């Protein structure tokens, strides 16, 4: 099932592999490379039709300078942080508690409650667009960061609960029983016994949620408008002027917007991969 | 709110005593919603609010700038629910839904002010049912932007009529180039072509009636327009595969010299200049006459200010509207450092820019037939969409004309009923 290490295969296959890999990589990364190259091109390169060639002048400082100092991008970035971080915290806090309850206590409706959390993941979120938009409008949360955070927390908690509950189930139950025998209060068991053991899961989940929410475009467009509340994924279109789109600035903006999740991935790579496989094999 | 009504009452009282509404007497709050969200227009709007505020120290101005696209959907909400005192919008048919719904205030009284005598060129665009519903603050010309160096190389001159336009084009094709670049992936680019061909073939009034649904798409006049268009298509005047390009993607053809001209609004000049076409290489001519019996008319999309009928401080709003169209203000906000477009007040001076000067002269003195707004502003949104899709199809498959016109006729019957 797991791919066999390449050293074990015949030399001819190794050579093919080594030749194919860079080609596949380039093909795979071509759009990204194009965006990266475009982000240092001057505006005129688009009008002269120089889409793929060498930049006619190296405008790194101008373009990125404009993105940071002459546009609403910093504002959008801040919005993204203010949306992503509270969502991350909210999901982790809620789902560690729901996960604990569903994983440790045996009550009659346990499985059904758990299924309800899981079922939320099976709902294609696009069909929620109109009701959720109306709901936030009625609650006065339309076009606010709070509205977006609350929705994300509500929607992501389902997935996180599945994740946490399965992780807690996998912990040795004897630890909890031993604590109970000692007469430790239930909340202290959660806080001092289970939570420290959950640290890898918490880290993995926080990283996953961070990338999910940071990259969310759909809800950002549906629930917010304007620089005071929109996150960066939606804000990039603000480089579209009335008459023409500033593709070079949009490229630079995209690169900037993509940096936090990429940085997060490289810094927390271990947790990220753990997060993807955690709960997959219970 | 009470204080507010008090000030209005005081204002009215002062009017009653025959004291004209002086600048100083405006007070309260003036709420302005604007869609001028890009950096330069935004600065213009903020500058105007600031200067108007300086004239009226007792007036507090609240300016809300909303992203242009978002504004288009939000306006429906805020005009009914939470109306500002002044709002940006567009002229002609684009304001019709709000006028018909009673959401815009009739400002004919403002237009009675002598200053508006200098705004004759745009008055028609602001008039519906014989009344005016807003004031313009900027517009820009459309026309043919061409490569002067290519024309010179081939010994061509700016065409004075359609025959010359076609003979020029034949010479350009002969030299291995295309006459016009076009990016019909943006359907509206074909709307510009239709506007000009139809206005030159049948005249502005006919065109206005067609976009207002009073003339059928199957009319003989429309067929004549398409016949003229087809002459250009059949001779290969347009670049190949134009449906694959957006209007910005169509610019490289004129920059590289593979196409000699583009029919476009003045906003095309900035990117073309950036791409290295200086004034010796890029020039402008008015779309030539086709039918000598009709007067020349131009497309000049106009952006406007309106007073919502739910506005609270209408006195201040009216004063602001007058302030906007003043010659000095028009000169300032439309200069190259700001909007870089044309002032609507004929007494304003236009920036020292070749294209703005030509456009200003053309619209002020050589557009006797009238000024149209542009196809997608003159026709209702649904009709504009259906028609421009039809134009694009026609440009690729001219033989489908009968089918297209029949389809547009059916659409028109549904939309204008």
Image: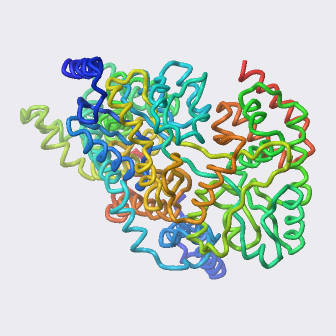
The correct choice, above or below, for B314 with respect to B375 in the image is above
Task: Give the quarter of the image for residue B83.
Answer: top left
Q: Residue at x 42, y 54 (%)?
A: B332
In the visual, does B295 lie left or right of A110? right
Measured as percent of width and height from the top left, residue B306 is found at: 46, 32
Measured as percent of width and height from the top left, residue B412 is found at: 76, 26
The quadrant the C terminus of chain B occupies is top right
Front-most of residues B33 and B397: B33
How has the structure been colored for display? rainbow
The correct choice, above or below, for B269 with respect to B20 in the image is below
Residue B371 in view: yes
Q: Residue at x 72, y 72 (%)?
A: B148
Front-most of residues A183 and A248: A248
In the visual, does A168 lie left or right of B195? left
The correct choice, above or below, for A29 with respect to B138 in the image is below
In the visual, does A44 lie left or right of A215? right
The quadrant the N terminus of chain B occupies is top left
Front-most of residues B147 and B366: B366
Measured as percent of width and height from the top left, residue B152 is found at: 77, 76
Task: Give the quarter of the image for residue A265.
Answer: bottom left
The residue lying furthest to the left in this view is A183
Measured as percent of width and height from the top left, residue B294 is found at: 81, 42
Residue B240 in view: no
Q: Residue at x 13, y 32 (%)?
A: A186
The residue lying furthest to the front in this view is B18
The total number of labels drawn is 0
């Amino acid at each position: 099932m797991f791919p066999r290490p390449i050293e074990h295969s015949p030399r001819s296959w190794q050579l093919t592999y080594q030749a194919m890999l860079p080609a596949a990589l380039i093909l795979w990364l071509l759009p990204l490379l194009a965006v990266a190259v475009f982000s240092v091109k001057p505006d005129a390169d688009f009008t002269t039709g120089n889409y793929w060639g060498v930049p006619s002048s190296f405008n790194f400082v101008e373009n990125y300078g404009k993105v940071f100092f002459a546009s609403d991008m910093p504002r959008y970035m801040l919005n993204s942080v203010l949306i992503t971080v509270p969502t991350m915290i909210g999901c982790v806090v809620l789902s560690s508690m729901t996960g604990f309850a569903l994983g440790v206590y045996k009550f009659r409706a346990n499985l059904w409650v758990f299924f309800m959390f899981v079922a939320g993941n099976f709902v294609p979120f696009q069909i929620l667009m109109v009701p959720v938009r109306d709901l936030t409008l009625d609650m006065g949360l339309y076009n606010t960061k709070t509205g977006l955070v609350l929705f994300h927390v509500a929607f992501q908690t389902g997935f996180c609960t599945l994740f946490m509950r399965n992780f807690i189930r996998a912990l040795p139950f004897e630890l909890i029983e031993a604590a109970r025998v000692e007469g430790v209060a239930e909340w202290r068991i959660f806080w001092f016994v289970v939570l420290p053991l959950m640290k890898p899961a918490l880290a993995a989940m926080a990283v996953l949620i961070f990338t999910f929410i940071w990259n969310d475009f759909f809800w950002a467009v549906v629930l917010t408008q304007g620089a005071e509340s929109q996150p960066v994924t939606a804000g990039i279109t603000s480089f579209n002027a009335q008459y023409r789109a500033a593709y070079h600035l949009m490229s630079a903006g995209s690169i900037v917007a993509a940096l936090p999740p990429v940085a997060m991935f490289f810094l927390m790579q271990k947790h990220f991969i753990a997060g993807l496989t955690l709960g997959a094999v219970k | 709110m009470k204080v507010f009504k008090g000030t209005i009452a005081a204002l009215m009282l002062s009017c009653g005593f025959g004291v004209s509404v002086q600048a100083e007497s405006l007070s309260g709050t003036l709420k302005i919603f604007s869609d001028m969200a890009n950096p330069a227009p935004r600065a213009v709007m903020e500058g105007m609010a600031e200067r108007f505020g300086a004239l009226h120290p007792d007036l507090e101005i609240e300016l809300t700038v909303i992203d242009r696209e978002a504004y288009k959907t939000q306006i429906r909400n805020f005009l009914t629910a939470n109306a500002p005192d002044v709002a940006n919008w567009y002229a002609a048919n684009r304001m019709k839904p709000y006028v018909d719904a009673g959401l815009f205030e009739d400002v004919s009284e403002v237009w009675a002010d002598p200053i508006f005598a200098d705004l004759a060129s745009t008055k028609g665009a602001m008039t519906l049912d014989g009344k005016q519903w807003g004031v313009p603050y900027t517009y820009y010309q459309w026309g043919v932007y061409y490569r002067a160096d290519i024309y010179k190389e081939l010994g061509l001159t700016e065409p004075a009529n359609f025959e010359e336009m076609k003979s020029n084009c034949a010479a350009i094709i002969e030299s291995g180039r295309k006459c016009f670049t076009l990016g019909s992936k943006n359907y509206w680019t074909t709307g510009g072509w239709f506007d000009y061909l139809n206005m030159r073939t049948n005249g502005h009034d006919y065109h206005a009636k067609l976009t207002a649904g009073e003339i059928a798409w199957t009319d003989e006049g429309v067929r004549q327009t398409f016949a003229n268009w087809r002459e250009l298509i059949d001779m290969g005047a347009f670049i190949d595969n134009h449906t694959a390009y957006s209007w910005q993607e169509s610019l490289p053809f004129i920059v590289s010299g593979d196409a000699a001209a583009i029919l476009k609004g003045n906003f095309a000049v900035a990117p073309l200049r950036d791409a290295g076409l200086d004034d010796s290489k890029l020039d402008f001519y008015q779309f030539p006459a086709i039918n000598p019996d009709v007067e020349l008319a131009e497309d000049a999309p106009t952006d406007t200010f309106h007073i919502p009928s739910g506005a609270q401080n209408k006195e201040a709003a009216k004063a602001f509207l007058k302030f906007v169209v003043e010659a000095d203000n028009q000169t300032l906000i439309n200069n190259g450092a700001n909007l870089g477009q044309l002032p609507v007040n004929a007494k304003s001076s236009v920036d020292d820019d070749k294209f703005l000067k030509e456009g200003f002269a053309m619209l002020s003195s050589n557009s006797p037939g009238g000024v149209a707004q542009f196809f997608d502003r003159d026709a209702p949104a649904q009709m504009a969409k259906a028609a421009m899709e039809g134009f694009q199809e026609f440009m690729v498959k001219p033989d489908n004309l009968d089918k297209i016109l029949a389809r547009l006729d059916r659409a028109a019957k549904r939309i204008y009923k």
